[in-house]
Amino acid sequence: MTYSPPVFVKELVVKYGSFVAVDGISFTVEPGEIYGLLGPNGAGKTSTLKSVNRAFKACFRES
């Protein structure tokens, strides 16, 4: 059995039209960790979390 961390993001890119809000962010959150995103306004923190949230919802959506 292969171990997979609960949250694993690799080279995430988020675009709104031609504007790149997130450009290749990667991170892992291990069990028991608390993870924070820090940065100035417009750095892509909210876009990153919304994208990760959408991916979780898609993975766990009931058929």
Image (cartoon, rainbow, N blue to C red):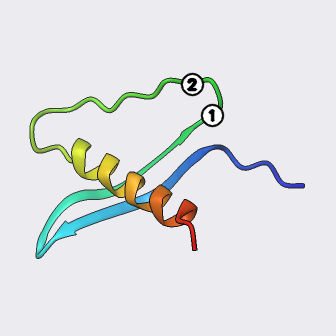
Q: Quadrant of the C terminus?
A: bottom right
Report the residue at 49% width, 56% height from top: 56
User: In this image, 19 relative to 31: left or right?
Assistant: left
User: In this image, 14 relative to 9: left or right?
Assistant: left
Where in the figure is residue 35, as x and y percent of width and height? 45, 28
Q: Amino acid at mark 2?
A: Glu
Which residue sits furthest right? 1
Q: Quadrant of residue 59?
A: bottom right
User: In this image, 46 relative to 26: left or right?
Assistant: left
Number of disc labels: 2
Where in the figure is residue 55, as x and y percent of width and height? 45, 61
Q: Decide: few, some or many residues near mark 2? Use Cα within 10 Å; few <14, some 14-19, many ≥20.
A: few
Task: Report which residue position mark 2 lands on.
Answer: 33
Local secondary structure at mark 1: loop
Task: Report which residue position mark 1 lands on.
Answer: 30
Q: Quadrant of residue 45?
A: top left
Label 2 and label 1: CA atoms lie apart by: 6 Å
Report the residue at 21% width, 32% height from top: 39
Local secondary structure at mark 2: loop
Where in the figure is residue 28, as x and y percent of width and height? 55, 42
Q: Quadrant of residue 37?
A: top left
Which residue sits furthest front? 63
**Residues at discs 2 and 1 in contact (Cβ within 8 Å):** yes
- Label disc, if present, on residue 2 of the rendered structure: none
Q: Decide: few, some or many residues near mark 1? Use Cα within 10 Å; few <14, some 14-19, many ≥20.
A: few
User: In this image, 3 relative to 52: left or right?
Assistant: right
Report the residue at 84% width, 54% height from top: 2
Report the residue at 27% width, 63% height from top: 14
Where in the figure is residue 1, as x and y percent of width and height? 90, 55
22 and 30: which is toward the camera: 30
13 and 47: which is toward the camera: 47
